[in-house]
Amino acid sequence: MRAFIPNLITLLNLLMGCVAVVLAAYNHLIEAGIFMALGIFFDFFDGLAARMLNVSSEMGKQLDSLADVVTSGVVPGIVMFQLLNAQNIDLSIFNNAVNVEWFAYLGFLITLGSAYRLAKFNIDENQSDKFIGLPTPANAILILSIPFIIEFGNQEWLSSIFKSELFLIPLTLFSVIALNMNIELFSLKLKSLSFKENKLIFLFLIASLVLLILLKFLAIPLIILSYILVSILFKKNTAKN
């Protein structure tokens, strides 16, 4: 029974992802973001639970990636599709009224890039304490922050920028590249609850919390970019030492 606890947490991640898929498909992007965040919350703790209970397994690793494909791959792909197709949302195929901007399908490049990144992660033994490329949950949070910025930003000029395909298409391409770039990023998964063993993670999370308090949802893209930059600087500093 103890060995199943981490897998149960992973399955909760998958369940939240499935709910988020349905909500995103119906263009309820804020609600989809909430359920995706719940899924990522479970994803954050399944590995920790496995290590603390000493029940890590190959099956758990595979199950974790399968759940992430849905929660952190399919969901942001659908959300980007909806954002790119925001002015043409009539998808009633039974009335022959499908009206989709062709470039809206570019949103699913995020899903493809996420699946490819997770497949590489599963066969790469060098990513136990670090990541090569942006982790799919971080990328999913980046994409799902856009509807929240548009909805709660209270700045019309800012919302118009984030709604524009001139911003969304480059963001999509950046997302796919960031997922699969050959750059080491430090892992955000806790090995334990010890501050000493997870100093960089805790400091980064505290700084991120401060940014969220000050800038609210607009802080999320800045946090993701900071994550990449901090990882690069940390890597250079470690190499020098």
Image: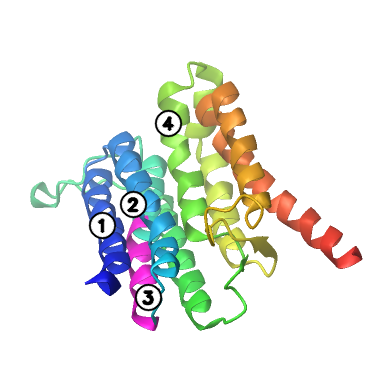
Which mark, by number, is residue 167?
A: none
Q: Which residue is mark 2?
A: 39
Which color scheme is applied? rainbow
Label 4 and label 1: CA atoms lie apart by 24 Å
Q: Position of residue 239 (x, y in %)?
A: 86, 67
Say which label, 3 or 4, has the lower sequence index: 3
Determine whether, in the image, residue 237 is placed left or right of residue 141. Answer: right
Say which label, 4 or 1, has the lower sequence index: 1
Q: Which residue is mark 3?
A: 55
Say which label, 3 or 1, has the lower sequence index: 1
Going by the numbered disc 1, the residue's amino acid type is: Leu
- In what element is the residue under mark 1? helix
Front residue of 17 and 167: 17
Are discs 3 and 4 less than 8 Å apart at CB? no
Label 1 and label 2: CA atoms lie apart by 7 Å
Label 3 and label 4: CA atoms lie apart by 37 Å
Bounds of the magenta span? Answer: 58-71
Which mark, by number, is residue 148?
A: 4
Are discs 1 and 2 less than 8 Å apart at CB? yes
Q: Position of residue 70 (x, y in %)?
A: 32, 61
Label 2 and label 4: CA atoms lie apart by 17 Å
